[in-house]
Image: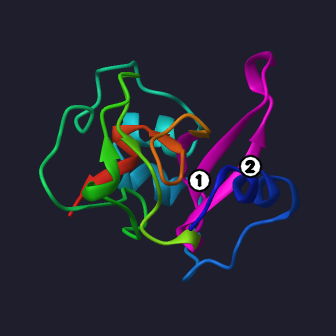
Amino acid sequence: MINWNKVLQLAETGNLTPPRRLEKTDAEWRAQLSMEQYRITRAHGTERPWSGEYCEAHDPGLYACVCCGVELFDSRQKFDSGTGWPSFSQPAAENVIQYRVDTSFGMKRVEVCCNVCDAHLGHVFPDGPPPTRLRYCINSAALKKL
């Protein structure tokens, strides 16, 4: 099971091998995605809190990357963090998430991206529930419910 120390290690030294890779040109991504999906996943944007489609969703199922379709999170790991974004305590598999050190906005955070297509998903923080104590704070526009 992944924990904060492993997240930091992966962000600093490199990520696990993804299950597969998908690369497209910028024009291909723009043609596939809505403007909001593109802004968030390809341009590293963030949606406003409590505005995302999956923020309050609690139906069972899997959440996949809106860009490549790889399964990222299981609804059984979803919890109400009170932050305004869908939050999960762990990914569906350790190798589907890529971790990057993010020093934007004058702070040090860990950005999470899809390890298959490099789509920006959100950030991970060490203030989630047991047993992982992780909170994957994810933009709804980066996800599609399966």
Q: In the displayed structure, does residue 74 sit left or right of residue 2?
A: left
Q: In the displayed structure, does residue 83 sit left or right of residue 107?
A: left
x then y, percent, for residue 15: 74, 67
Q: Which region is colored magenta?
A: 95-123
Q: Which mark is residue 113?
A: 1
Looking at this rendering, what residue extends furthest in the front direction?
130
**Residue 96 among those drawn in magenta:** yes
**Residue named by callout 2:** 100
Q: What residue type is labelled 2?
A: Arg
How many residues crowd around disc 1 within 10 Å: few (fewer than 14), some, or many (20 or more)? many
In-front residue for pair 90/36: 90
x then y, percent, for residue 104: 76, 25
Identify the image quadrant of the N terminus. bottom right
Q: In the displayed structure, does residue 98 sit left or right of residue 54?
A: right
Location of residue 115 with respect to 11 vertically, above or below? below
x then y, percent, for residue 115: 59, 66
Splitting the image into 4 quarters, where does residue 44 fall? top right
Q: How is the image coloured?
A: rainbow
Looking at this rendering, what residue extends furthest in the right direction?
13
**Residue 38 among those drawn in magenta:** no
User: Residue placed at 60% from the left, 63% from the top?
Assistant: 2
Is disc 1 in contact with disc 2, using a CB cutoff of under 8 Å? yes
Q: What residue type is labelled 1?
A: Cys
The secondary element bearing badge 2 is classed as strand
User: Residue placed at 59% from the left, 53% from the top?
Assistant: 113
Q: How far apart are marks 1 and 2 (CA)?
A: 8 Å
The secondary element bearing badge 1 is classed as strand
